[in-house]
Image (cartoon, helix red, strand yellow):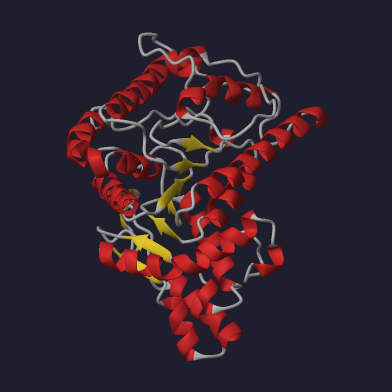
Amino acid sequence: MFDARQGLYTARELLDGFNPEHTLAFTETFDFSVFRAFVKEGGAVPKTLDIRRRQAEHDSCIGDGLRRFLKAHDRPLVGIMGGHSVPRDDAAYRDLALLAGHLNERGYLIVTGGGPGIMEAAHFGVVFSGRNAAKFDEALAFLKGTPRFPDLDGLIDSDGNVAPDMEGKRIQARDWLAASLKARSMAEGELPVSLAIPTWLYGAEPTMPFASHYGKYFQNSIREEALVNNSRTGIVYGHGGGGTLREIFQDVELNFYAKQPKDFTPMIFFDKAGFWTSQPDIKGTVVVHDRIKLDQVVPNILRTARLKIDKDDAKVKECLNKIYFGDVYDDIDRILRAHAPTAQSNREFALNAQPLKVSISRINRA
């Protein structure tokens, strides 16, 4: 199950065995069978050295497949991060999908963490851009019929057995995935290229099938590093929670130590509804509007850091101008486009194993 492989996965491989006619089809996929084995053999803490070695070999092969994929697709790589729980009928889902489609049409290659919610929205937007843009609303309306996937925590026990009392949730998960596949079938031709980098650590989350390539890892730490560090042209942050915050502050750290302003990577907080610029609305113990106000925190942290490094107001401003809170496509594209040449240059050096030519201290970050 943990054998090394050549290249990245496809949705067809991961979802092999899925039959929407079967009541419990969600747990019959190759993807889920690997997750069951992963949990049975210790999850994030493998039970034996042999399991650890096989997982490491698998993840090394995925890393090499990712390197070859990026060499073959020489386009500015933009990461899109966001929460897995954003439902398909939420305005944030549609807004992010439209932005991702726009970025795809502008020549950027989209990469996400490969999960549901905002991540699915990004790949859905790529699929229904360009020649399939006219079908966007039809496919989205179909997806809205199954807006949320169920909470599948506890679906399997530590021995990899499926809990017998969760049949209803397994059916919900099947229907959620079946809707994804049906919506994807509404697109004409081959899927546009986009990259998902998920992990079996979160294997209870259904695999969305809208990406063309999947670099699925066992170790989430390696996956996070690959995801954030390879989003060289910039990262777009949609509505999210704890996982998105981790990625934001991982990005903050890298920009904190960037050697020069040109190496500072754009941080785009995509914000139509004040999610990143407003305080949460809480009444008693009820969260009325879930928001995370970062429009002062992130710039202040990085302004302080850059003053220590750059010691020049003009250089600090050059960095801070790459932090954007808003939703204007032209502004987003302008920021990403200006940074793309540096990102592409550093990516070329990194992919060709020329670390001394990469202009920053971290070989795979620009």
Nearer to the camera, 288 or 10? 10
Count of residue discs: 0
Q: Front-most of 41 and 314?
A: 314
Residue 233 horizontal/vertical position (percent)? 47, 61
At a point 61% along the width and 40% down the height, the residue shown is: 65
Q: Is residue 72 visible?
A: yes
Q: Quadrant of residue 234?
A: bottom left
- Is 300 situated left or right of 257 in this image? left
Residue at image x 29%, y 25%?
185
State the residue in front, 285 or 2.
Answer: 2
Q: Is residue 347 above or below residue 261?
A: above
**How far from the left and from the top, in percent, is residue 254?**
58, 66
Tell me: 223 left or right of 327.
right
In which quadrant will I find the C terminus?
A: bottom right
Q: Position of residue 309 (x, y in %)?
A: 60, 83
The quadrant of the image that shows the N terminus is top right
Question: Residue 94's image quarter?
Answer: top left
Pinpoint residue 263: horizontal percent, then vertical percent.
54, 72
**From the viewer's perspective, is residue 297 above or below residue 160?**
below
Up-down: is 313 above or below 246? below
Residue 74 horizontal side relative to residue 359, left or right: left
Residue lying at the far right of the rendered structure:
49
Residue drawn at x 42%, y 18% as measured from the top left: 170
